[in-house]
Amino acid sequence: MLIDLESPLYSQSDVLKMLPALKAKQLQNWSDRGILDAGDQKPGKGSRRKYTPAGVIGLDFLQKATDFGVPPSNAMDMAQDYLDAAAEFLDSNPEVITRTDGCRWIPFRPGNMDKFRRATITRHGNEYFFFLDNDRADTPFAELSPDLKEKLGECDDETYRRFNERIRLSFGITVEVDYRIAQTVNRMFLLEAGMI
């Protein structure tokens, strides 16, 4: 894998450098409340919390989702699907280049952006759902989570498709999943190179 997602590597200061939209108080609040298992959350007296790369990726998603009005508890439920997508993306061996300044980098080019997956966060009533589009090509129908399939009961694909379309119309935010994950990993590379 490109990076070890589970190694606690980053201090709170590192996380705030990599995720500049995240405020220190918000990070502390989420850590204290256990909103996301982002690493070594209870290091003991005299030790500092360390955050894993998976935790940083999850915190980036939480920040984005809550900025769109999704309550943290709902965003936390969706974060595991997002982290699974991150592991899949990083396991797919995305292209990594070494820039002229020596920093590793996942490049974004018009030619490879169409291969990146996206997701839609939708709201129906008081419930929020995370739909990951596994195929960017021409597939409007997203894969429904097992939890949502269970709530809907046994339905055929056409019923799922109609439900998906209806729920997207009620409230929908598109998140460029692989692109956003790549951006977060690139910020990890910048930190590793001492550039942020």
Image: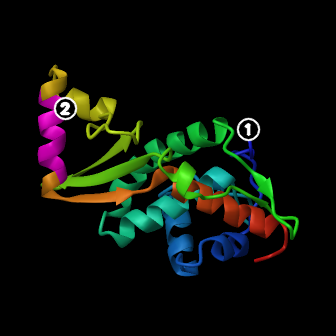
The magenta stretch spans residue 162: yes
Checking the image for residue 151, the label placed there is 2
Is residue 182 positioned above or below 17 on the image?
above
- The location of residue 42, given as percent across then percent down, is 67, 57
Of circles 1 and 2, the one toward us is 1
The residue that appears at 16% across and 19% down in the rendered structure is 154
Query: Label 2 is placed on what type of residue?
Result: Lys
The residue lying toward the viewer, choosing from 166 and 55, is 166
- The location of residue 30, given as percent across then percent down, is 50, 66
The residue that appears at 32% across and 51% down in the rendered structure is 120
The residue that appears at 53% across and 75% down in the rendered structure is 22
Q: Report the span colored magenta.
A: 159-168
The residue lying toward the viewer, choosing from 33 and 65, is 65
| Disc 1 element | loop
The residue that appears at 76% across and 68% down in the rendered structure is 190
The residue lying toward the viewer, choosing from 18 and 132, is 132
- The location of residue 39, given as percent across then percent down, is 66, 53
The magenta stretch spans residue 2: no
Q: Which residue is mark 1?
A: 1
By secondary structure, the bulk of the magenta-drawn segment is best described as helix
